[in-house]
Image (cartoon, rainbow, N blue to C red):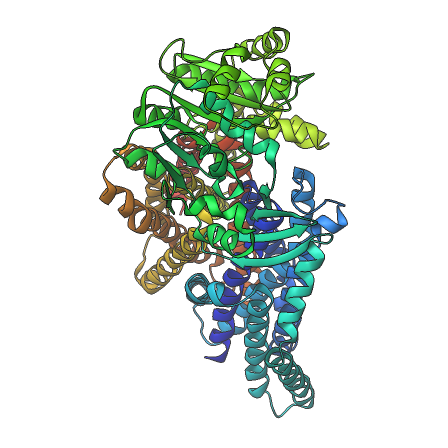
Amino acid sequence: MTVLFSIFLIGFTAMSAQIVIMREFLIVFYGNELSIGFILGSWLMWGALGSWFLARFADRAKSKLDLFSISQLVLSCLLILSILAVRSVKFYFRLAPGEIAGFMPMIISSFIILAPICMLMGFMFSLGCRIYQTKSAEMANNIGMAYAWESVGALLGGTLLSFVFIRLLDSITIVVILGLLNIFAALCLQWKLKTRKTSVLLAGVLIFILIADCVLWFSGRWSSLDEYSRKRQWQGYDILEDRNSIYGNIMVTKMDNQYSFFDNGLHLYSVPDKLACEQAVHFALLEHNDPRDLLLVGGGVGGLIGEMLKYPIRSVDYLELDPVIVEMAEKYLPARDYEPLKNAKVSIYNLDGRFFIKTTQRKYDCVITHLGDPYTALINRFYTVEFFKEVKNILNEGGILSFALSSSESYISPELAEYLSSVYFGLKEVFRDVLVIPGDTAYFLASDKAGTLTRNYNILMDRARKRNLNLKYVREYYLFSELSPQLMAYTEGVLLQGRQVRLNHDFRPSTYYYNMTFWAKRLGGPVFEKMLETFSFGRALIAVSGICVLIILTGLFGIRKSKNFYKQGSLMALMCAGFSSMAIQIIILLTFQIIYGYVFYKIGILLTVFMAGLAAGSFWMTTLMKRLKKPLNILIGLNSLFSILSLTLPAFFSWLSTSGKEIVFQAGASIIFPSLSVIAGLLAGAQFPIVNKIYLGQKQEEAGQIAGLTYGIDLLGSCLGALLSGIFLIPVLGISWSCFIVAAINFSALIVLLLGRDRF
């Protein structure tokens, strides 16, 4: 039972640490969902290597319990070091706090930082299987049971972390608790061997470390380390407060007399910033004949509402998903900067902007989104054709939509042109009148009434004088430059050259992809940039078709050469299952982000229920193992179900996205998406013990190596699924085609299994 508890603790520690470290990486990498693919891919790759290549030591080690105890002790140290390493990423890459990191730092740091901890945990699983299998002669059953117990630990760890720990404790304290649990488990293992001198000595060391950790915890030293490492991460800034909300990490800093707000490390706005506020508000409101009812998505705390109140308006509805941002603004901003939010005409809603716009019955004269560039899938959903249609439905006749994107006044590169054109033509798909005001920040304005928008700055300044506006920057000399015919003609000419770009849709986030390519070029990531450029839609389909054909040909060749190829075929099916389960999980996470916009809140829950499915599938199949006469047929059935699941996912997603019923919308977040994660985990978890039964045979003496091999194959497939789906498939092909590709790969493995069935 002590060994099972230690195996259970591997899963508990792995899932808890994964969520904590992933949240820390998301803060460093400005909430970019690509980092989820890199992190999960790195985590699974190193876990596979640890399980696969280090598994030989699981069978050769003389004192396996001692080795396992030492591994638990080392793991407790690596957990703390990993958090500190993540927080030092920008320091070592010489990136300023709030600066956008390139993709190479993202790739390099995730691979290096996660290597020690993940390889160790992968090895510990193989070692745990070898220790546990000595209790029984049924090798496959024992490995399946170990896999199930690890999954149960992951389920409990993810649940406690998502609902309890993450809301009450800082990251360092959480990993210290995980370390203490591992040291306690190691001590329990040594208690089983208390008659041996080495065990007594090791137990003494463990007791000393356990007591020292507890003393440091209760004396507040670990919390002090958390605070120190965070300040070092934001060196040069005076941190006023750093708070984890359910939606993300919110930080307020001060430099001289300027206050800056950051969400997951991404700069939201600074106060005061008169130039940005005037541009964001007055370009739109001066273009309108008589703006009365306004909707603002983001940016209200940054000073935009104060500029809006200069007009004789009736109402301003301000949408800010995270209430912590408004709370911290009230707490730290000077009274004159926060006072506009208390105005009787202003209503603040802590709701997702897409959900509000999709369901509201109100109509507006102007809708202004102040969210910045679509660095993430969360922000990209506010630049899609579907979103523009939703905004159009809530605009009065002659109403205006306005937002801003990074640009260049003097030279627009081909990558930047594609990025801006994908949004420009998306607007023109929905609105009749579209205007782009050039500059280093380009302002996009759109109206469904032709002739609403003017390019004549004299008309705009005449309206400003009639409305008694006291403006510092949006004045004659500024508008004369920005709306000059030459600059306007250059910008529009560049945008019109991008007629062949893909439009940005919810389930095919093209602007997100073009933004990645643009920043890869700008931040000096030539390798990643070339990969993105090479991975076009057509080439992706050709590559996937080639992989499917290769899988089938490998099966045909292997069956002809070996009567026992069904064993290798089962490993191939397991790798495809790992690939599919993780690809589907990434698809679920990003689709949830697209539809609901707060995956940071749900990421722990969705990963946890996925592990619940793994545990349930493994337990279920392990209990049936003795009664299975033809396990290969069961493997074929599970593989078929994976293909069916992949094919039906796009229909589920489309239904949830287009439904205007609140009950369907809420059920999707709370029931449907978690259920899909459970099903994916269930199908993957059920395959693991079956493949072990097929591959293991009677090789009892090689149980540790075979457990490491199958676990490593499973993790390797999962690694490829996380990396390829998150980085290439979804941005380039979109959600639906990514699902179809997952189905095609599973179907190819299914053909191999069917061809080899008669040999089993």
Q: Nearer the viewer, residue 584 or 552?
A: 584
Is residue 377 visible in the rendered structure shown here?
A: no
User: Residue at horizontal 53%, vertical 41%?
Assistant: 302
Q: Is residue 258 left or right of residue 593?
A: right
Q: Nearer the viewer, residue 69 or 555?
A: 69
Q: Position of residue 15 (x, y in %)?
A: 50, 60
Q: Nearer the viewer, residue 68 or 273?
A: 273
Q: Is residue 72 left or right of residue 369?
A: right
* Quadrant including the N terminus: bottom left
Is residue 590 visible in the rendered structure shown here?
A: yes
Identify whether 311 is placed above or below 54.
above
User: Residue at horizontal 57%, vertical 74%?
Assistant: 182
Q: Nearer the viewer, residue 452 or 199?
A: 452
Identify whether 148 is placed above or below 479.
below
Q: How many marks?
A: 0
Identify whether 106 is placed above or below 688.
above
Identify whether 134 is placed above or below 425.
below
Q: Residue 197 appears in which quarter of the rendering?
A: bottom right
Q: Position of residue 661 (x, y in %)?
A: 23, 38
Q: Position of residue 260 (x, y in %)?
A: 61, 47
Q: Residue 202 appears in which quarter of the rendering?
A: bottom right
Q: Residue 116 appears in which quarter of the rendering?
A: bottom right
Q: Is residue 113 left or right of residue 433?
A: right
Q: Position of residue 100 (x, y in %)?
A: 65, 39
User: Residue at horizontal 31%, vertical 27%?
Assistant: 394
